[in-house]
Amino acid sequence: MATPVESIGFGEEQATAADQSIDIPAVPPLSVATPYLVMLGAMVLAILAADRIIARKTPTTIVTREFKAFQQSFLHVHLCALGAEYLQDSHLFAVLLRHGHSVEDVASLYAASFTVSYLFGVVASYLPGGAAGILGGRRSACMACFILYATAALSVYHDDYGTLLLGRFLYGMGTALMHTVFDAWMRAEHMAQAFPEEWLVQTYQVSVRYTTAAAIGAGLASEVAATYGDLATPFLLSVAVCGLGLSLISRSWKGTYERLNCDCAGLATMGRSISEGIQGILALVNANPSDRSALHLVVVQACFEACIYIALFMWTPTLQASAVEHFGLGTPPPYGIIFAMLMAALMLGSHTFRLMSLSPSYRPSPETVSRTLCIMACAACLFLAIFGTSLHWWGLGAFLVFEFCVGLYYPAIGGLRGKYVPYESQSLVAQLSKSALAILVLSLLLNFSTVNSIMFLACSCLLGAAVFVLYHALQEAPPPSSLPPVMHGEA
Protein backbone atom coordinates (compact mmCIF):
# COMPACT_ATOMS: atom_id res chain seq x y z
CA MET A 1 0.00 0.00 0.00
CA ALA A 2 1.29 3.46 -0.83
CA THR A 3 1.32 6.51 1.37
CA PRO A 4 1.02 10.02 -0.07
CA VAL A 5 4.27 11.88 0.25
CA GLU A 6 2.51 14.83 1.82
CA SER A 7 1.72 12.59 4.78
CA ILE A 8 5.36 12.41 5.73
CA GLY A 9 6.20 16.04 5.10
CA PHE A 10 7.43 17.32 8.43
CA GLY A 11 8.64 20.85 8.87
CA GLU A 12 9.40 23.60 6.41
CA GLU A 13 12.29 21.66 4.89
CA GLN A 14 9.81 19.13 3.43
CA ALA A 15 7.39 21.66 1.98
CA THR A 16 8.67 21.34 -1.57
CA ALA A 17 8.43 17.54 -1.43
CA ALA A 18 4.87 17.74 -0.18
CA ASP A 19 3.84 19.64 -3.29
CA GLN A 20 4.74 16.69 -5.52
CA SER A 21 2.14 14.03 -6.26
CA ILE A 22 4.33 10.98 -5.67
CA ASP A 23 3.29 7.90 -3.76
CA ILE A 24 5.58 6.31 -1.20
CA PRO A 25 5.38 2.61 -0.41
CA ALA A 26 4.48 1.59 3.12
CA VAL A 27 7.64 -0.46 3.70
CA PRO A 28 11.23 -0.23 2.41
CA PRO A 29 12.91 -2.83 0.18
CA LEU A 30 15.18 -5.43 1.77
CA SER A 31 18.31 -3.66 0.56
CA VAL A 32 17.37 -0.61 2.63
CA ALA A 33 16.36 -2.65 5.70
CA THR A 34 19.61 -4.69 5.77
CA PRO A 35 21.82 -2.05 7.51
CA TYR A 36 19.18 -1.63 10.21
CA LEU A 37 19.05 -5.39 10.74
CA VAL A 38 22.85 -5.57 11.05
CA MET A 39 22.83 -2.80 13.67
CA LEU A 40 19.99 -4.49 15.55
CA GLY A 41 21.84 -7.80 15.49
CA ALA A 42 24.94 -6.19 17.00
CA MET A 43 22.82 -4.62 19.75
CA VAL A 44 21.13 -7.94 20.53
CA LEU A 45 24.54 -9.62 20.84
CA ALA A 46 25.64 -6.88 23.23
CA ILE A 47 22.49 -7.40 25.33
CA LEU A 48 23.06 -11.16 25.46
CA ALA A 49 26.69 -10.67 26.47
CA ALA A 50 25.73 -8.21 29.22
CA ASP A 51 22.98 -10.51 30.42
CA ARG A 52 25.41 -13.41 30.66
CA ILE A 53 27.88 -11.33 32.70
CA ILE A 54 25.09 -10.21 35.02
CA ALA A 55 23.90 -13.81 35.45
CA ARG A 56 27.42 -14.92 36.44
CA LYS A 57 27.73 -12.14 39.03
CA THR A 58 24.25 -12.63 40.50
CA PRO A 59 23.74 -15.31 43.17
CA THR A 60 21.49 -18.13 42.02
CA THR A 61 18.29 -18.66 43.98
CA ILE A 62 17.09 -22.26 44.31
CA VAL A 63 13.31 -22.38 43.86
CA THR A 64 10.69 -25.12 43.76
CA ARG A 65 9.04 -26.62 40.71
CA GLU A 66 5.70 -25.17 41.80
CA PHE A 67 7.17 -21.68 41.90
CA LYS A 68 8.65 -22.05 38.43
CA ALA A 69 5.25 -23.13 37.09
CA PHE A 70 3.60 -20.12 38.74
CA GLN A 71 6.32 -17.81 37.43
CA GLN A 72 5.94 -19.08 33.87
CA SER A 73 2.15 -18.75 33.96
CA PHE A 74 2.54 -15.08 34.87
CA LEU A 75 5.40 -14.30 32.49
CA HIS A 76 3.70 -15.84 29.46
CA VAL A 77 0.62 -13.67 29.98
CA HIS A 78 2.73 -10.59 30.70
CA LEU A 79 4.70 -11.27 27.54
CA CYS A 80 1.45 -11.22 25.56
CA ALA A 81 0.45 -7.90 27.15
CA LEU A 82 3.80 -6.35 26.32
CA GLY A 83 3.71 -7.71 22.79
CA ALA A 84 0.20 -6.38 22.20
CA GLU A 85 1.31 -2.92 23.31
CA TYR A 86 4.58 -2.86 21.35
CA LEU A 87 2.97 -4.13 18.14
CA GLN A 88 0.74 -1.05 18.16
CA ASP A 89 3.45 1.43 19.12
CA SER A 90 5.81 0.69 16.24
CA HIS A 91 3.54 1.82 13.36
CA LEU A 92 1.00 4.03 15.14
CA PHE A 93 2.17 7.41 13.85
CA ALA A 94 2.47 6.18 10.26
CA VAL A 95 -1.00 4.59 10.34
CA LEU A 96 -2.65 7.72 11.70
CA LEU A 97 -1.01 9.83 8.98
CA ARG A 98 -2.13 7.34 6.34
CA HIS A 99 -5.74 8.24 7.12
CA GLY A 100 -5.03 11.76 5.90
CA HIS A 101 -4.97 13.50 9.28
CA SER A 102 -2.49 16.31 9.88
CA VAL A 103 0.49 15.98 12.19
CA GLU A 104 -1.29 18.33 14.61
CA ASP A 105 -4.29 15.97 14.68
CA VAL A 106 -2.00 13.04 15.38
CA ALA A 107 -0.41 15.01 18.22
CA SER A 108 -3.85 15.59 19.72
CA LEU A 109 -4.59 11.84 19.50
CA TYR A 110 -1.38 11.08 21.38
CA ALA A 111 -2.34 13.74 23.93
CA ALA A 112 -5.78 12.14 24.37
CA SER A 113 -4.25 8.72 25.03
CA PHE A 114 -1.81 10.15 27.55
CA THR A 115 -4.52 12.17 29.33
CA VAL A 116 -6.86 9.20 29.72
CA SER A 117 -4.04 6.99 31.00
CA TYR A 118 -3.04 9.63 33.55
CA LEU A 119 -6.57 10.41 34.78
CA PHE A 120 -7.59 6.76 34.98
CA GLY A 121 -4.49 5.96 37.00
CA VAL A 122 -5.01 8.88 39.39
CA VAL A 123 -8.69 8.16 40.00
CA ALA A 124 -8.07 4.43 40.50
CA SER A 125 -5.27 5.12 42.99
CA TYR A 126 -7.70 6.94 45.30
CA LEU A 127 -10.53 4.41 45.09
CA PRO A 128 -10.71 1.54 47.59
CA GLY A 129 -9.32 -1.51 45.79
CA GLY A 130 -7.93 0.59 42.95
CA ALA A 131 -8.47 -0.43 39.32
CA ALA A 132 -8.91 -4.06 40.35
CA GLY A 133 -11.78 -3.08 42.64
CA ILE A 134 -13.52 -1.27 39.79
CA LEU A 135 -13.25 -4.23 37.43
CA GLY A 136 -14.07 -7.04 39.83
CA GLY A 137 -10.62 -8.31 40.72
CA ARG A 138 -7.03 -8.35 39.52
CA ARG A 139 -7.61 -11.24 37.12
CA SER A 140 -10.62 -9.49 35.58
CA ALA A 141 -8.65 -6.24 35.32
CA CYS A 142 -5.87 -8.03 33.40
CA MET A 143 -8.45 -9.48 31.01
CA ALA A 144 -9.97 -6.01 30.59
CA CYS A 145 -6.53 -4.72 29.58
CA PHE A 146 -6.39 -7.18 26.67
CA ILE A 147 -9.94 -6.29 25.60
CA LEU A 148 -9.13 -2.57 25.64
CA TYR A 149 -5.92 -3.10 23.66
CA ALA A 150 -7.70 -5.23 21.06
CA THR A 151 -10.52 -2.71 20.61
CA ALA A 152 -8.05 0.14 20.29
CA ALA A 153 -6.13 -1.80 17.64
CA LEU A 154 -9.25 -2.38 15.57
CA SER A 155 -10.09 1.33 15.66
CA VAL A 156 -7.18 2.16 13.32
CA TYR A 157 -9.07 0.49 10.47
CA HIS A 158 -11.45 3.49 10.46
CA ASP A 159 -10.57 6.85 8.94
CA ASP A 160 -13.01 8.79 11.09
CA TYR A 161 -11.25 11.03 13.61
CA GLY A 162 -13.87 10.36 16.28
CA THR A 163 -13.34 6.60 16.03
CA LEU A 164 -9.58 7.05 16.22
CA LEU A 165 -10.03 9.29 19.26
CA LEU A 166 -12.17 6.64 20.95
CA GLY A 167 -9.48 4.08 20.19
CA ARG A 168 -6.85 6.30 21.82
CA PHE A 169 -9.09 6.64 24.89
CA LEU A 170 -9.34 2.87 25.17
CA TYR A 171 -5.63 2.43 24.62
CA GLY A 172 -4.88 4.95 27.37
CA MET A 173 -7.06 3.01 29.81
CA GLY A 174 -5.37 -0.23 28.77
CA THR A 175 -1.93 1.30 29.35
CA ALA A 176 -2.93 2.41 32.86
CA LEU A 177 -4.05 -1.15 33.63
CA MET A 178 -1.03 -2.72 31.96
CA HIS A 179 1.45 -1.01 34.27
CA THR A 180 -0.41 -1.75 37.51
CA VAL A 181 -2.73 -4.76 37.60
CA PHE A 182 -0.43 -7.45 36.16
CA ASP A 183 2.21 -6.80 38.79
CA ALA A 184 -0.52 -6.55 41.46
CA TRP A 185 -1.91 -9.99 40.47
CA MET A 186 1.54 -11.56 40.49
CA ARG A 187 2.42 -10.20 43.93
CA ALA A 188 -0.97 -11.18 45.40
CA GLU A 189 -0.77 -14.75 44.05
CA HIS A 190 2.88 -15.01 45.14
CA MET A 191 1.83 -14.27 48.72
CA ALA A 192 -1.35 -16.36 48.50
CA GLN A 193 0.68 -19.43 47.55
CA ALA A 194 3.07 -18.77 50.46
CA PHE A 195 6.21 -18.46 48.35
CA PRO A 196 9.14 -16.71 50.13
CA GLU A 197 9.09 -12.97 49.60
CA GLU A 198 12.72 -12.91 48.45
CA TRP A 199 11.76 -15.01 45.41
CA LEU A 200 9.93 -11.97 44.01
CA VAL A 201 13.31 -10.60 42.93
CA GLN A 202 13.89 -13.57 40.65
CA THR A 203 10.54 -13.04 38.95
CA TYR A 204 11.44 -9.43 38.24
CA GLN A 205 14.88 -10.44 36.92
CA VAL A 206 13.39 -12.98 34.52
CA SER A 207 10.75 -10.41 33.56
CA VAL A 208 13.51 -8.13 32.23
CA ARG A 209 14.51 -10.83 29.73
CA TYR A 210 10.90 -11.32 28.68
CA THR A 211 10.49 -7.56 28.23
CA THR A 212 13.57 -7.45 26.01
CA ALA A 213 12.30 -10.36 23.92
CA ALA A 214 8.83 -8.81 23.63
CA ALA A 215 10.15 -5.42 22.54
CA ILE A 216 12.58 -6.68 19.91
CA GLY A 217 10.31 -9.50 18.74
CA ALA A 218 7.30 -7.20 18.41
CA GLY A 219 9.32 -4.71 16.38
CA LEU A 220 10.50 -7.38 13.94
CA ALA A 221 7.07 -9.02 13.78
CA SER A 222 5.40 -5.69 13.02
CA GLU A 223 7.89 -5.05 10.20
CA VAL A 224 7.18 -8.47 8.67
CA ALA A 225 3.44 -7.93 9.05
CA ALA A 226 3.64 -4.51 7.37
CA THR A 227 5.81 -5.93 4.57
CA TYR A 228 3.38 -8.70 3.64
CA GLY A 229 0.25 -6.73 4.53
CA ASP A 230 0.00 -2.98 5.05
CA LEU A 231 0.75 -0.46 7.78
CA ALA A 232 -2.33 -1.54 9.77
CA THR A 233 -1.52 -5.27 9.72
CA PRO A 234 0.62 -5.11 12.92
CA PHE A 235 -2.52 -3.93 14.74
CA LEU A 236 -4.39 -7.00 13.56
CA LEU A 237 -1.49 -9.09 14.85
CA SER A 238 -1.83 -7.25 18.18
CA VAL A 239 -5.49 -8.34 18.33
CA ALA A 240 -4.41 -11.96 17.86
CA VAL A 241 -1.86 -11.63 20.68
CA CYS A 242 -4.58 -10.18 22.91
CA GLY A 243 -6.72 -13.22 22.16
CA LEU A 244 -3.84 -15.48 23.13
CA GLY A 245 -3.37 -13.58 26.38
CA LEU A 246 -7.05 -13.89 27.26
CA SER A 247 -6.90 -17.61 26.56
CA LEU A 248 -3.88 -18.07 28.82
CA ILE A 249 -5.54 -16.16 31.67
CA SER A 250 -8.78 -18.12 31.44
CA ARG A 251 -6.92 -21.45 31.49
CA SER A 252 -4.12 -20.93 34.01
CA TRP A 253 -4.82 -17.92 36.25
CA LYS A 254 -6.71 -17.96 39.49
CA GLY A 255 -8.61 -14.98 40.79
CA THR A 256 -11.46 -13.99 43.00
CA TYR A 257 -14.06 -11.29 42.61
CA GLU A 258 -13.07 -8.22 44.61
CA ARG A 259 -16.05 -5.97 45.08
CA LEU A 260 -15.39 -2.23 45.21
CA ASN A 261 -16.29 -0.97 48.65
CA CYS A 262 -18.50 2.04 47.93
CA ASP A 263 -20.08 2.31 51.36
CA CYS A 264 -19.48 5.20 53.73
CA ALA A 265 -16.30 3.61 55.07
CA GLY A 266 -14.88 3.27 51.55
CA LEU A 267 -15.71 6.85 50.67
CA ALA A 268 -14.20 8.00 53.95
CA THR A 269 -10.97 6.17 53.09
CA MET A 270 -10.86 7.84 49.67
CA GLY A 271 -11.54 11.25 51.20
CA ARG A 272 -8.84 10.71 53.81
CA SER A 273 -6.32 9.79 51.10
CA ILE A 274 -7.11 12.96 49.14
CA SER A 275 -6.86 15.06 52.29
CA GLU A 276 -3.51 13.54 53.20
CA GLY A 277 -2.30 14.14 49.67
CA ILE A 278 -3.16 17.85 49.88
CA GLN A 279 -1.42 18.08 53.25
CA GLY A 280 1.63 16.39 51.77
CA ILE A 281 1.79 18.85 48.86
CA LEU A 282 1.60 21.78 51.27
CA ALA A 283 4.33 20.21 53.40
CA LEU A 284 6.60 19.90 50.37
CA VAL A 285 6.03 23.49 49.30
CA ASN A 286 6.48 24.93 52.80
CA ALA A 287 9.42 22.75 53.79
CA ASN A 288 12.80 24.18 54.75
CA PRO A 289 15.24 24.47 51.83
CA SER A 290 17.24 21.54 53.23
CA ASP A 291 14.09 19.38 53.22
CA ARG A 292 12.98 20.11 49.66
CA SER A 293 14.93 17.28 48.04
CA ALA A 294 11.72 15.40 47.28
CA LEU A 295 10.28 18.45 45.51
CA HIS A 296 13.48 18.83 43.49
CA LEU A 297 13.22 15.19 42.54
CA VAL A 298 9.68 15.82 41.26
CA VAL A 299 11.10 18.46 38.91
CA VAL A 300 13.79 16.10 37.60
CA GLN A 301 11.31 13.27 36.99
CA ALA A 302 8.74 15.47 35.28
CA CYS A 303 11.31 17.11 32.96
CA PHE A 304 13.01 13.89 31.88
CA GLU A 305 9.88 11.78 31.52
CA ALA A 306 8.18 14.51 29.47
CA CYS A 307 11.08 14.27 27.03
CA ILE A 308 10.65 10.47 26.93
CA TYR A 309 7.05 10.85 25.82
CA ILE A 310 7.88 13.55 23.26
CA ALA A 311 10.63 11.35 21.81
CA LEU A 312 8.10 8.50 21.57
CA PHE A 313 5.96 10.80 19.45
CA MET A 314 8.76 12.43 17.43
CA TRP A 315 10.92 9.53 16.29
CA THR A 316 8.66 8.45 13.43
CA PRO A 317 8.15 11.84 11.70
CA THR A 318 11.77 12.87 12.24
CA LEU A 319 13.24 9.70 10.75
CA GLN A 320 10.62 9.75 7.98
CA ALA A 321 11.78 13.19 6.91
CA SER A 322 15.48 12.29 7.06
CA ALA A 323 14.82 9.04 5.13
CA VAL A 324 13.27 11.08 2.31
CA GLU A 325 16.37 13.27 2.38
CA HIS A 326 18.78 10.31 2.45
CA PHE A 327 17.16 7.54 0.41
CA GLY A 328 14.88 9.53 -1.88
CA LEU A 329 11.15 10.06 -2.11
CA GLY A 330 10.36 6.40 -2.81
CA THR A 331 11.81 4.87 0.36
CA PRO A 332 10.38 5.08 3.91
CA PRO A 333 12.36 3.79 6.92
CA PRO A 334 11.61 0.34 8.39
CA TYR A 335 9.49 1.44 11.36
CA GLY A 336 9.35 -1.93 13.07
CA ILE A 337 13.09 -2.55 12.92
CA ILE A 338 13.83 0.98 14.15
CA PHE A 339 11.38 0.48 17.02
CA ALA A 340 13.20 -2.75 17.94
CA MET A 341 16.52 -0.88 17.84
CA LEU A 342 15.21 1.86 20.13
CA MET A 343 13.96 -0.70 22.64
CA ALA A 344 17.26 -2.60 22.41
CA ALA A 345 19.11 0.65 23.21
CA LEU A 346 16.88 1.12 26.25
CA MET A 347 17.67 -2.42 27.42
CA LEU A 348 21.39 -1.78 26.90
CA GLY A 349 21.14 1.25 29.16
CA SER A 350 19.40 -0.80 31.84
CA HIS A 351 22.01 -3.57 31.59
CA THR A 352 24.82 -1.02 31.74
CA PHE A 353 23.49 0.34 35.03
CA ARG A 354 23.19 -3.18 36.37
CA LEU A 355 26.79 -3.95 35.38
CA MET A 356 28.02 -0.78 37.08
CA SER A 357 26.12 -1.66 40.26
CA LEU A 358 27.77 -5.10 40.29
CA SER A 359 31.27 -3.78 39.60
CA PRO A 360 33.63 -4.07 42.60
CA SER A 361 35.80 -1.16 41.44
CA TYR A 362 33.40 1.40 39.93
CA ARG A 363 30.00 2.08 41.40
CA PRO A 364 28.88 5.62 40.56
CA SER A 365 26.28 7.23 42.78
CA PRO A 366 22.71 7.71 41.49
CA GLU A 367 23.40 11.48 41.40
CA THR A 368 26.43 10.99 39.14
CA VAL A 369 24.58 8.64 36.80
CA SER A 370 21.54 10.94 36.67
CA ARG A 371 23.61 14.03 35.86
CA THR A 372 25.57 12.19 33.17
CA LEU A 373 22.53 10.69 31.45
CA CYS A 374 20.66 14.01 31.48
CA ILE A 375 23.63 15.74 29.83
CA MET A 376 23.87 12.99 27.21
CA ALA A 377 20.12 13.14 26.52
CA CYS A 378 20.25 16.94 26.28
CA ALA A 379 23.09 16.72 23.73
CA ALA A 380 21.10 14.16 21.70
CA CYS A 381 18.05 16.45 21.61
CA LEU A 382 20.18 19.43 20.57
CA PHE A 383 21.65 17.37 17.74
CA LEU A 384 18.18 16.33 16.60
CA ALA A 385 17.02 19.94 16.73
CA ILE A 386 19.78 20.95 14.31
CA PHE A 387 20.35 17.91 12.10
CA GLY A 388 17.43 15.56 12.84
CA THR A 389 15.70 15.77 9.45
CA SER A 390 18.82 16.01 7.29
CA LEU A 391 21.31 13.41 8.59
CA HIS A 392 19.39 10.14 8.77
CA TRP A 393 21.96 7.78 10.27
CA TRP A 394 23.28 10.36 12.71
CA GLY A 395 19.72 11.24 13.68
CA LEU A 396 18.97 7.57 14.30
CA GLY A 397 22.13 7.40 16.41
CA ALA A 398 20.95 10.37 18.47
CA PHE A 399 17.63 8.62 19.16
CA LEU A 400 19.52 5.49 20.18
CA VAL A 401 21.69 7.52 22.57
CA PHE A 402 18.55 9.06 24.05
CA GLU A 403 16.93 5.66 24.57
CA PHE A 404 20.15 4.36 26.12
CA CYS A 405 19.86 7.23 28.60
CA VAL A 406 16.25 6.22 29.28
CA GLY A 407 17.48 2.74 30.19
CA LEU A 408 19.92 4.30 32.65
CA TYR A 409 17.31 6.72 33.98
CA TYR A 410 14.79 4.33 35.53
CA PRO A 411 17.16 2.51 37.93
CA ALA A 412 19.03 5.76 38.66
CA ILE A 413 15.87 7.67 39.56
CA GLY A 414 14.80 4.72 41.69
CA GLY A 415 18.04 5.09 43.64
CA LEU A 416 17.41 8.81 44.11
CA ARG A 417 13.87 8.16 45.37
CA GLY A 418 15.16 5.63 47.85
CA LYS A 419 17.75 8.13 49.11
CA TYR A 420 15.74 11.35 49.26
CA VAL A 421 12.12 10.27 49.72
CA PRO A 422 10.92 8.40 52.83
CA TYR A 423 9.15 5.16 51.98
CA GLU A 424 5.83 6.32 53.41
CA SER A 425 5.88 9.42 51.17
CA GLN A 426 6.90 7.84 47.87
CA SER A 427 3.29 7.48 46.74
CA LEU A 428 2.78 11.23 47.16
CA VAL A 429 5.96 12.09 45.26
CA ALA A 430 4.97 9.70 42.44
CA GLN A 431 1.56 11.38 42.10
CA LEU A 432 3.13 14.84 42.07
CA SER A 433 5.62 13.75 39.41
CA LYS A 434 2.84 12.34 37.24
CA SER A 435 0.81 15.53 37.59
CA ALA A 436 3.76 17.73 36.62
CA LEU A 437 4.56 15.33 33.78
CA ALA A 438 0.98 15.57 32.48
CA ILE A 439 1.14 19.36 32.43
CA LEU A 440 4.43 19.38 30.49
CA VAL A 441 3.44 16.70 27.96
CA LEU A 442 0.03 18.20 27.22
CA SER A 443 1.53 21.69 26.92
CA LEU A 444 3.96 20.43 24.28
CA LEU A 445 1.58 18.18 22.34
CA LEU A 446 -1.37 20.57 22.28
CA ASN A 447 0.90 23.41 21.15
CA PHE A 448 2.69 21.17 18.68
CA SER A 449 4.93 22.75 16.06
CA THR A 450 5.46 21.02 12.72
CA VAL A 451 9.01 22.38 12.75
CA ASN A 452 10.68 19.57 14.67
CA SER A 453 13.61 21.70 15.83
CA ILE A 454 11.27 23.62 18.15
CA MET A 455 10.09 20.42 19.85
CA PHE A 456 13.61 19.14 20.39
CA LEU A 457 14.80 22.52 21.62
CA ALA A 458 11.98 22.43 24.16
CA CYS A 459 13.17 18.99 25.27
CA SER A 460 16.73 20.32 25.54
CA CYS A 461 15.52 23.11 27.81
CA LEU A 462 13.66 20.64 30.04
CA LEU A 463 16.72 18.41 30.28
CA GLY A 464 18.89 21.45 30.99
CA ALA A 465 16.56 22.30 33.88
CA ALA A 466 16.92 18.75 35.19
CA VAL A 467 20.72 19.00 35.01
CA PHE A 468 20.61 22.33 36.88
CA VAL A 469 18.50 20.82 39.68
CA LEU A 470 20.73 17.75 39.91
CA TYR A 471 23.89 19.84 40.19
CA HIS A 472 22.64 22.56 42.50
CA ALA A 473 19.89 20.96 44.59
CA LEU A 474 20.62 17.24 44.89
CA GLN A 475 24.41 17.16 44.71
CA GLU A 476 25.10 17.26 48.41
CA ALA A 477 21.58 17.57 49.82
CA PRO A 478 20.94 15.50 52.94
CA PRO A 479 17.92 13.18 53.02
CA PRO A 480 14.74 14.99 54.11
CA SER A 481 13.81 14.78 57.77
CA SER A 482 10.22 13.68 57.25
CA LEU A 483 7.21 14.01 55.02
CA PRO A 484 3.60 13.16 55.83
CA PRO A 485 2.67 9.61 54.86
CA VAL A 486 0.11 9.10 52.12
CA MET A 487 -1.75 5.84 51.60
CA HIS A 488 -3.58 5.14 48.34
CA GLY A 489 -5.70 2.20 47.29
CA GLU A 490 -3.94 -0.83 45.91
CA ALA A 491 -4.18 -1.73 42.25
Image (spheres, grey):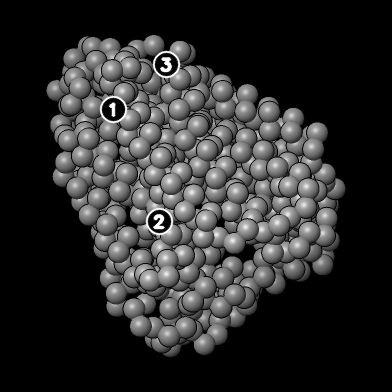
Q: Which mark lies nearer to you, 3 or 1?
A: 1
Q: Residue at x 46, y 65 (%)?
A: 358
Residue 316 placement: quadrant: top left
Q: Residue 35 carries which label?
A: 1
Q: What SS does tag 2 mark? A: helix
Amino acid residing under circle 1: Pro
Residue 464 placement: quadrant: bottom left
Q: How crowded is mark 3: few (under 14 residues within 10 Å), some or many (20 or more)?
A: many
The tag earlier along the polypeptide, 2 or 1, is 1
For the residues marked 2 and 1, what is the alpha-carbon distance in whole angstroms?
Answer: 24 Å
For the residues marked 2 and 3, what is the alpha-carbon distance in whole angstroms?
Answer: 34 Å
Q: Which mark is residue 161?
A: none
- Whether residue 373 is visible, yes or no, is yes
Horizontal and vertical percent position of residue 45: 41, 40
Tell me the quarter of the image containing the C terminus: bottom right
Q: Residue at x 62, y 35 (%)?
A: 80
Q: Is residue 132 left or right of residue 375?
A: right
Q: What SS does tag 1 mark? A: helix
Horizontal and vertical percent position of residue 381: 25, 50
Q: Which residue is drawn at 36% across and 50% down?
A: 404
Q: In this view, does 482 lie to the left or right of 451?
A: right
Residue behind mark 3: 227
Residue behind mark 2: 352
Residue 359 placement: quadrant: bottom left
**Nearest to the observer: residue 119 or residue 473:** 473
- Whether residue 173 is visible, yes or no, is no
